[in-house]
């Protein structure tokens, strides 16, 4: 019983945290920054290709009249650097005193004076100067100085160049001499900043929630049902799940930025072929995986401990201001640890025994050990000791903190008045409908994001494991078959996990009325009627695609079938016909339709069909999937059974798979075509009978027309409120970007 309550508290807290407006604003900023930073060079290239200059006018460099010929040297260097279209040299005649009032924009005054030993220069401008301009001016002044010294001491140019030539000093660290380690160093710096800003958000959330619940005394009611320790555990685990979701979102932003980058490059024909996956995969090595794993593990436990401490400190406060001060204290502690890490961990000095001991202390280890892994200074004993101490400290801190937390909660000094509570309750009641529909968007959006992240992430992992797995099997199975097996496993996991996520919500929000399932015989009739509908959809889709000139076969384009052996044919049939029929139907129809049926069958059918079509990520398959999805969703809502759509899905995919497998065997193809023709004839006969029966009931359907219009209006309201949820919007953006990327790849192929 208690475990069920704790799960409900965690689920509620995660939903509130993710759908909080500040969480959404933070993620919008992260999304924009990620996409912009990964495509910054593309933006500059676009501006350059379209002759869009960021400089307003040509910059004039005025050189004071002197005997060193600086203007000639400067002019030559400007031409050599390709800046002649941006800079113009003007020789100053006469002495002019410039001030901020009389100096013009895009004007640089260069004053050169001679002394006994060398020359001096002054660069005067109204505002900051482009660094490229500064560099070329400084280089010209240095050359003028060299000419001055050469003339004074009768030195030739070679001697002057030899004196000024800087020695080549190369710093070699053999443990860091590859591209992956360079990238890892950058990733380490970025992740430290990301963790710090995530801590700001999470600690503030914990502090505010505790104070609000304490002020409204709702937390006292919760503590009558569960213990203080269980409440703390649920509160902190909620924060951990929010952190994990934020981690997933951050990965998604990077992926979207990378795919947009590839789309832009493919659109401008700046790349040949598609090599994104391989380039990303080349940076993945054991050290990189160890760093990511340790960072994630240590950050999770550290955030757990810090948020427990934050909850205890917040329980001692009486208002939001005091709680905010406790948050600042913990943030300053983490900032101090980050600064200490940068001073104590360096690539140029080996760490002392003191550093190794300090690095094993919980919380400190989150900053020290990942940085030491990047520099190759960490050792296995240090990592094991730090991990054990961190894992042990989490439950220990939770147990000790629970007592102080309960004392702080029960000793409250400030109470909200009953009238204020009543007003708050009225506001909450007014917003229930909007929140319910927005929550639906959150659940659907997160399920789609889970599917996409698992598909992309596991695909990358499977590519990394295919070669070792093939070598381990000693060539018993071909590389292509190993790839098919790994792809099938990825597909199954990617569909099962979001299905289970949806079922978790469907069980809780299931209506009290038990669904009435059609008899198996009636359900089988729906299967027969579905077969000619599939045939008709195939014909209509082929016509539409030929009209819009995107009629390509994805299986042929991507070389998904290799029929060189019997095993290859079996695996191909399982991959194309059996697995999608089972697991796509589980997610799309059993998961999504069952979850959405509480809002009406029409809404469930349309929404599940749209998601089913969009997740195919290319126009050719999406048009067919949309029409097919409508048929499948209608059958599920009519029969309340999943096996009819599984059979139809199997028939549709299986026919395509068998056609490829037996493309050279005309006898088998003839038998398959004959059986399919008979099934179409039977299905058409049942459709005719059903239409006749439907016409007889036409009058009754006219009576329900007003009810149908009301349902349509309600559907539009649901969609409108769903689009207020950030997670749902992020899922839509991801699908759009991946769809465009897929279309570009198929077009190139």
Image (tube, rainbow, N blue to C red):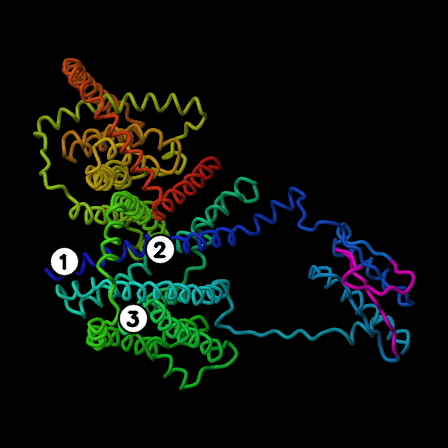
Q: In x, y percent, where is residue 642?
A: 16, 36
- Taking the image as drawn, is residue 658 in sight? no
Q: CA distance from mark 3 to mark 1?
A: 31 Å
Q: In x, y percent, where is residue 128?
A: 69, 62
Q: In x, y percent, where is residue 544?
A: 39, 23
**Range of residues picked out in magenta:** 91-115
- Look at the numbered disc 3 and give the secondary structure of its residue: loop
First reached walking from the N terminus: tag 3 or tag 1: 1
Q: CA distance from mark 3 to mark 2?
A: 35 Å
The vertical placement of 620 against 592, above or below, is: above
First reached walking from the N terminus: tag 3 or tag 2: 2
User: Does the magenta-highlighted stretch encompass residue 584?
Assistant: no
- Look at the numbered disc 2 and give the secondary structure of its residue: helix
Crowd tier of the residue under label 1, counting other residues whose Cα lies within 10 Å: few below 14, some 14–19, many 20 or above: few
- Look at the numbered disc 1 and give the secondary structure of its residue: helix
User: Quadrant location of residue 397?
Assistant: bottom left
User: Does the magenta-highlighted stretch encompass residue 102?
Assistant: yes
Q: Nearer the viewer, residue 600 or 615?
A: 600
Secondary structure mostly seen in magenta is loop
Q: Which mark is residue 318?
A: 3
Looking at the figure, which quarter contains the N terminus? Answer: bottom left
The residue identified by callout 1 is: 4
Q: Nearer the viewer, residue 427 or 107?
A: 427
Give me the residue at 71% from left, 74% from top: 166
The residue identified by callout 2 is: 248
Q: In x, y percent, where is residue 103?
A: 79, 59
The vertical placement of 30 against 316, above or below, is: above
- Asked if residue 171 lies left or right of residue 577, the reply is right
Asked whether the residues under the numbered discs 3 and 1 touch, taking CB atoms below 8 Å apart as contact, a structural biologist would say no
First reached walking from the N terminus: tag 2 or tag 1: 1
């Amino acid at each position: 019983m208690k475990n069920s309550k704790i799960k409900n508290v965690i689920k509620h807290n995660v939903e509130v945290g993710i759908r909080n407006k500040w969480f959404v604003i933070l993620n919008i900023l992260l999304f924009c920054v990620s996409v912009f930073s990964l495509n910054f060079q593309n933006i500059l290239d676009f501006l350059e290709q379209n002759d869009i200059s960021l400089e307003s006018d040509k910059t004039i460099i005025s050189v004071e009249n002197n005997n060193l010929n600086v203007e000639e040297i400067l002019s030559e260097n400007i031409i050599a650097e390709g800046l002649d279209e941006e800079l113009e040299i003007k020789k100053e005649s006469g002495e002019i005193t410039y001030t901020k009032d009389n100096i013009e924009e895009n004007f640089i005054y260069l004053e050169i004076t001679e002394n006994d030993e060398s020359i001096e220069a002054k660069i005067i401008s109204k505002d900051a100067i482009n660094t490229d301009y500064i560099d070329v001016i400084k280089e010209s002044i240095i050359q003028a100085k060299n000419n001055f010294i050469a003339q004074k001491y009768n030195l030739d140019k070679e001697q002057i160049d030899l004196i000024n030539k800087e020695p080549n000093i190369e710093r070699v660290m053999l443990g860091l001499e590859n591209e992956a380690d360079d990238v890892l160093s950058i990733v380490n710096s970025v992740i430290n900043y990301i963790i710090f800003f995530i801590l700001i958000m999470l600690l503030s959330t914990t502090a505010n929630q505790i104070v609000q619940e304490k002020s409204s005394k709702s937390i006292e009611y919760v503590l009558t049902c569960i213990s203080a320790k269980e409440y703390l555990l649920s509160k902190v685990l909620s924060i951990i799940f929010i952190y994990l979701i934020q981690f997933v979102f951050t990965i998604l932003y990077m992926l979207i930025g990378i795919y947009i980058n590839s789309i832009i490059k493919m659109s401008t024909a700046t790349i040949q072929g598609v090599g994104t996956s391989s380039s990303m995969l080349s940076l993945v090595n054991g050290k990189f995986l160890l760093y990511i794993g340790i960072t994630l593990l240590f950050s999770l436990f550290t955030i757990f401990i810090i948020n427990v401490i934050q909850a205890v400190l917040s329980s001692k406060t009486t208002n939001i201001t005091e709680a905010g001060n406790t948050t600042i204290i913990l943030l300053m502690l983490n900032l101090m640890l980050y600064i200490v890490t940068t001073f104590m961990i360096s690539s140029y000095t080996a760490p002392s025994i003191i550093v190794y001991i300090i690095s094993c202390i919980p919380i400190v280890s989150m900053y020290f050990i990942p940085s030491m892994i990047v520099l190759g200074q960490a050792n296995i004993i240090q990592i094991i000791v730090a991990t054990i101490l961190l894992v042990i400290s989490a439950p220990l801190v939770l147990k000790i903190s629970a007592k102080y937390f309960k004392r702080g909660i029960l000793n409250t000094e400030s109470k909200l008045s009953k009238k204020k509570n009543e007003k708050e309750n009225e506001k909450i009641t007014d917003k229930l409908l909007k929140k319910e529909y927005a929550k639906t968007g959150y659940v659907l959006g997160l399920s789609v994001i889970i599917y996409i992240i698992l598909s992309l992430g596991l695909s990358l992992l499977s590519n990394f494991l295919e070669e070792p797995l093939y070598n381990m099997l000693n060539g018993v199975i071909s590389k292509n078959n190993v790839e098919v097996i790994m792809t099938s496993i990825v597909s199954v996991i990617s569909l099962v996990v979001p299905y289970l996520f949806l079922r978790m919500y469907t069980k809780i929000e299931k209506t009290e009325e038990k669904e009435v399932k059609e008899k198996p015989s009636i359900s089988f009739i729906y299967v027969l009627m579905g077969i000619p509908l599939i045939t008709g959809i195939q014909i209509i889709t082929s016509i539409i695609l030929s009209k819009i000139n995107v009629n390509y076969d994805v299986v042929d384009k991507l070389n998904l079938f290799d029929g060189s052996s019997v095993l290859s044919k079996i695996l191909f049939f399982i991959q194309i016909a059996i697995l999608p029929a089972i697991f796509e139907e589980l997610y799309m129809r059993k998961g999504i339709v069952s979850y959405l049926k509480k809002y009406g069958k029409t809404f469930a059918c349309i929404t599940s069909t749209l998601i089913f079509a969009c997740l195919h990520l290319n126009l050719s398959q999406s048009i067919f999937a949309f029409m097919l999805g409508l048929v499948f969703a209608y059958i599920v809502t009519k029969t309340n059974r999943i096996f009819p759509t599984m059979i139809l899905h199997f028939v549709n995919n299986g026919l395509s798979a068998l056609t490829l497998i037996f493309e050279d065997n005309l006898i088998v193809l003839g038998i398959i075509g004959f059986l399919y023709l008979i099934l179409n004839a039977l299905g058409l006969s049942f459709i005719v009978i059903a239409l006749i029966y439907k016409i007889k009931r036409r009058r009754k359907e006219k009576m329900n027309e007003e009810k149908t219009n009301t349902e349509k209006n309600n559907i539009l309201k649901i969609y409108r409120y769903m689009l207020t949820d950030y997670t749902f919007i992020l899922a839509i953006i991801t699908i759009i970007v991946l769809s465009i990327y897929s279309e570009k790849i198929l077009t190139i192929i």
